[in-house]
Amino acid sequence: MALIEIEGMEFYAFHGHFDVEKVAGNRFLVDLKIEADCSKAGQSDRLEDTLDYQKAYLAVKEEMAIPSDLLEHVGQRIVNRIKTEFQETQKVSVKISKMTPPMGGQIEKVSVTTFG
C-alpha cells in the first residue's frame, strides 16, 4: 500500500454561491491524497503498474473547471472520479481551499476536505 499525495495544485475557478463569485472567480488550492495498492509498481518499476500522477492531476483540473455552488460538491466529484478511474485506489481525500473568500473580513482561506 502507498500514499500518493499531490499537493498545492493551484487553479483559478468559478465556484461559489454568490453571483460575484460565479463571474469574477477566485484562486483555489487543492491537495489530493490517494491510498492505493502500488506493490506491483514497487517490483516492476513500470508506470503502467501504478497510479499515474499526471492523469490524477488532469482529472482534478477538469473537475475544477466545472463551476459549482459549493466546495463540497466539487470535492465529492473529484473523489468519485478518482475512485472510478483508478481501480487500485483504496481511499481518497481531497482538500479544496478558496483563497481570500468574500466573507466580509480578512480571511486567508476557507477549506473543505472530502473523503471517500
Image: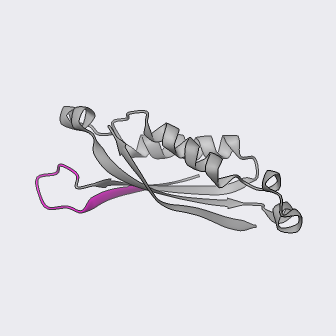
Give the quarter of the figure containing the N terminus.
bottom right
Q: What span is in magenta? A: 101-112
Q: Where is residue 19 shown, x and y percent of the image?
A: 20, 32
Q: Main secondary structure of the magenta part?
A: loop
Model colouring:
one colour
Q: Is residue 110 magenta?
A: yes
Which residue sits at x=22%, y=37%?
24
Q: Nearer the viewer, residue 82 or 23?
A: 23
The image quadrant that residue 99 belongs to is bottom left
Looking at the image, residue 36 lies above or below residue 67: below
Which residue sits at x=71%, y=67%?
2
Which residue sits at x=31%, y=49%?
27
Q: Where is residue 47 shown, x and y percent of the image?
A: 78, 55
Q: Where is residue 104 shown, x and y percent of the image?
A: 11, 52
Give left or right: position of 90 versus 49: left
Q: Residue furthest left?
A: 104
Q: Where is residue 31 shown, x and y percent of the image?
A: 48, 59
Looking at the image, residue 108 lies above or below residue 77: below
